[in-house]
Image: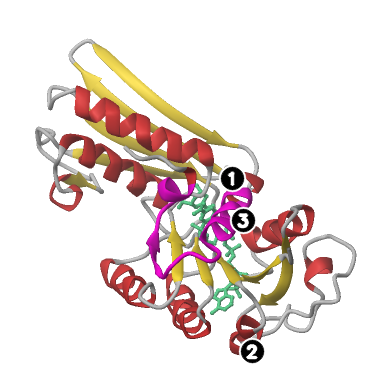
Amino acid sequence: MTDMGLVIVGAAGRMGRTLIRLVTETEGVTVAGAIEREGSPFVGQDAGVVAGLPALGIAISDDPLPVFAQAQGVLDFTSPAATLGFAEIAAQARIVHVIGTTGLSAEDHAAIDAAARHAAIVQSGNMSLGVNLLAQLVRQAARALDEDFDIEVLEMHHRHKVDAPSGTALLLGQAAAEGREIDLAEHAVRVRDGITGPRPRGAIGFAALRGGSVIGDHSVMLAGEGEMITLSHHASDRALFARGAIKAALWAHGRKPGRYSMADVLGFTD
Ligand SMILES: NC(=O)C1=CN([C@@H]2O[C@H](COP(=O)(O)OP(=O)(O)OC[C@H]3O[C@@H](n4cnc5c(N)ncnc54)[C@H](OP(=O)(O)O)[C@@H]3O)[C@@H](O)[C@H]2O)C=CC1
Ligand SMILES: O=C(O)C1=N[C@H](C(=O)O)C[C@H](O)C1
């Protein structure tokens, strides 16, 4: 069988470079193209060299349409505005779109839903096996424990991260809300500053730390009277997100158009 050709958009970014390396090492997939924004100094450079590998003979382009037309999937860890543009083009080309980009608004999610009518899209705030397992455990714990246990989601990332709370923190908060059978938007406390008053019963709180080169640390605390359960995940290498994204692309290849999650890819049913 021929390899699945994957286009890496945001190819010169932290995740883009990691994806190029991982795709070249993984059986069944090949780098079919690499995209950066118009005006980027990386346009025209060899994608392999930018990723720290020997040359691949693939020049980074700023024109996604003809590149997507020659591929079967797109791996996208860029920015919300860029991802919406890529979703339209991937839908036009009818190819798999794996979206790792975070900081997406409700309107962005609606636009992704629209694109998913024409192509298979796998979107997740975190592509790692460990975090998606953690979300299952958080859902279970939140279901088992009532509102006497306060749920707080804590995350820390490197100093370059531009969105907060992280996509993973929101994914974990969503899992907790599902366990409690409540609407996250109605119960989320995303910012605290000044005289906040006591904690609302049943709230799901978020706290975001930024500093250094931290790749991604997440903890969900369920704090009761005199006892606390903490469920945590520590990422020490971006390769784990890249492996998940490649797995998602292979899983979605040949599937009918629709919006899928990493839980679908990993076969987590609860
Ligand atoms: N779901 C998951 O598992 C994970 C998600 N992420 C998310 O992925 C995203 C990227 O993270 P990271 O790699 O650290 O960020 P970087 O800023 O290092 O990389 C993003 C890249 O995308 C490029 N880009 C932006 N707009 C466009 C465009 N219109 N066309 C082509 N390229 C574009 C940027 O170029 P320029 O610098 O010129 O703007 C940059 O090279 C973030 O939202 C992050 O939260 C990260 C890790 C795991
Ligand atoms: O920006 C990052 O780096 C990461 N972003 C994702 C998020 O917002 O949760 C996933 C991972 O933690 C790294």
- Give, as a three-letter code, the residue at label 2: Pro
Residue occupying the point 80% across, 78% down? 45
Give the answer, above or below, for where 123 lies relative to 120.
above
Work out whether mark 1 precedes mark 2 in sequence or the reverse, and give the earlier one. Answer: 2
Residue in front for this viewpoint, 69 or 105: 69
Q: Which residues are magenta?
A: 242-265
Position of the N terminus, as image quadrant, is bottom right
- The residue at the far top in this view is 226
Residue 218's spot in the image, x, y percent?
44, 37
- Residues 26 and 151: in front is 26
Residue at the spot of label 1? 212
* Element at label 1: loop
Dot 2: within a 10 Å radius of its alpha carbon, few (fewer than 14), some, or many (20 or more) residues? few
* Mark 3 or mark 1, whichever is nearer to me: 3
Q: Is 80 above or below relative to 37?
A: above
Task: For the residues labelled 3 and 1, say whether their Cβ atoms are less than 8 Å apart.
Answer: no
Residue hosting label 2: 66
The residue tagged 3 is 246
> Mark 3: which secondary structure?
helix
Q: Amino acid at mark 3?
A: Ile
Q: Earlier in the sequence, mark 2 or mark 3?
A: 2
Nearer to us: label 1 or label 2? 2
Q: Residue at 32% of width from left, 32% of height from top? A: 138
Mark found first going from the N terminus, 3 or 1: 1
